[in-house]
Structures are given as structure tokens and as C-alpha cells.
Image (cartoon, rainbow, N blue to C red):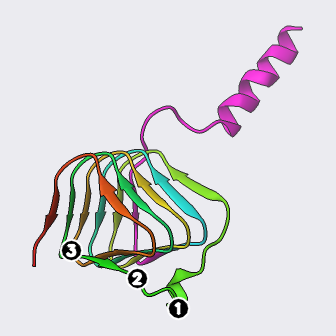
């Protein structure tokens, strides 16, 4: 019985994600699903979302824009990708679904979405 408990504990340690945030840094990023980030997001470029953008915190961008419905980036895919920590993208961020950020979202470029863009904090455009 102790051997089975030890194996289950080892399997859980390998397969379960860590309980603490994992910072992620990437170059330009394309997500072929919805994206949920449990922490702040910083994008050194534009943000393009084929669905809705919801930020649980302040949203700062060069400007906010509505994406044309026939734009190739407007293709929506199912599924969801989750990051458990801050996300920094060096370049553009394209999300083929919804974008949900549990923290502030800061973009050096525009934030454009096919759906709505809202925040539970102030929205600042740097135009």
C-alpha cells in the first residue's frame, strides 16, 4: 500500500502544474485557441483577438480598434490555453479566440478585437 501511495505522489508531482506562477517570455506569439493569463500581460507590439478581450485590471494600449470581420486573423478556433503567471511577448500577440487577463494588460501597439474590449480598471489609449 505504501508503494502505491508513493507512486501516486510521484505521478501527481510530475503531471500536475505547479501551484506557483510561471513567468513566460516569448517572441511573437500566435495562439490557435482562447487564451487565459493568470497574471499581467506585457506585449511589445500589437494585440489581435478574434473574439472578446476582458482584462481584470487596467488596460493600456496605443489605441483600441475593431478588427475587420474578413481579416485572416479573425479565424476562431476552439480550445483554451492557460498561463499561470506573467506573460511577456516580444512582438505581436494574435489570439484565435477570446483573451482573458487576470491582471493588467499593457501593449506598445494597438489592441484590436472582433468582439468587445472591456476592463475592470481604467482603459488608457496613448494616441
**Marks 3/1: CA distance?**
24 Å
Q: Which residue is mark 3?
A: 108
Task: Indicate the quadrant where residue 87 lies.
Answer: bottom left
Numbered disc 2: secondary structure: loop
In which quadrant is the N terminus drawn? top right
Verify CB contact (< 8 Å) between mark 2 and mark 3. no
Residue 4 drawn above or below residue 84: above
Is residue 21 in the magenta section?
yes
Report the mark closest to the observer, 3 or 1: 1
Q: Is residue 38 magenta?
A: no
Residue 70 disc label: 1
Left or right of residue 73: residue 78 = right
Question: Which residue position is annotated with label 2?
Answer: 67
Q: Give the residue drawn at x 35%, y 46%.
A: 39
Q: Quadrant of residue 2?
A: top right
Distance from Cα at disc 1 to Cα at disc 2: 9 Å
In the image, the segment drawn in magenta is 1-29
How many other residues sit within 10 Å of disc 1, few (<14), some (14-19) or many (≥20)?
few
In-image side of 98 versus 16 (left or right): left
Please, which residue is most extreme toward the top here? Answer: 1
Q: x and y percent of residue 21 in the render?
A: 42, 40
Q: What residue is at 21 percent from the left and 74 percent from the top?
A: 108
Residue 50 numbered mark, or none? none
Amino acid at each position: 500500500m505504501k508503494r502505491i501511495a508513493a507512486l501516486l505522489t510521484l505521478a501527481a508531482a510530475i503531471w500536475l502544474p505547479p501551484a506557483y506562477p510561471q513567468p513566460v517570455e516569448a517572441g511573437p506569439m500566435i495562439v490557435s485557441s482562447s487564451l487565459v493569463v493568470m497574471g499581467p500581460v506585457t506585449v511589445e507590439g500589437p494585440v489581435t483577438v478574434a473574439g472578446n478581450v476582458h482584462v481584470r485590471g487596467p488596460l493600456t494600449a496605443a489605441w483600441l480598434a475593431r478588427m475587420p470581420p474578413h481579416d485572416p486573423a479573425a479565424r476562431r478556433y476552439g480550445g483554451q490555453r492557460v498561463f499561470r503567471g506573467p506573460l511577456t511577448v516580444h512582438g505581436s500577440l494574435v489570439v484565435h479566440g477570446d483573451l482573458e487577463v487576470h491582471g493588467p494588460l499593457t501593449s506598445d501597439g494597438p489592441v484590436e478585437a472582433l468582439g468587445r474590449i472591456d476592463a475592470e480598471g481604467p482603459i488608457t489609449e496613448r494616441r
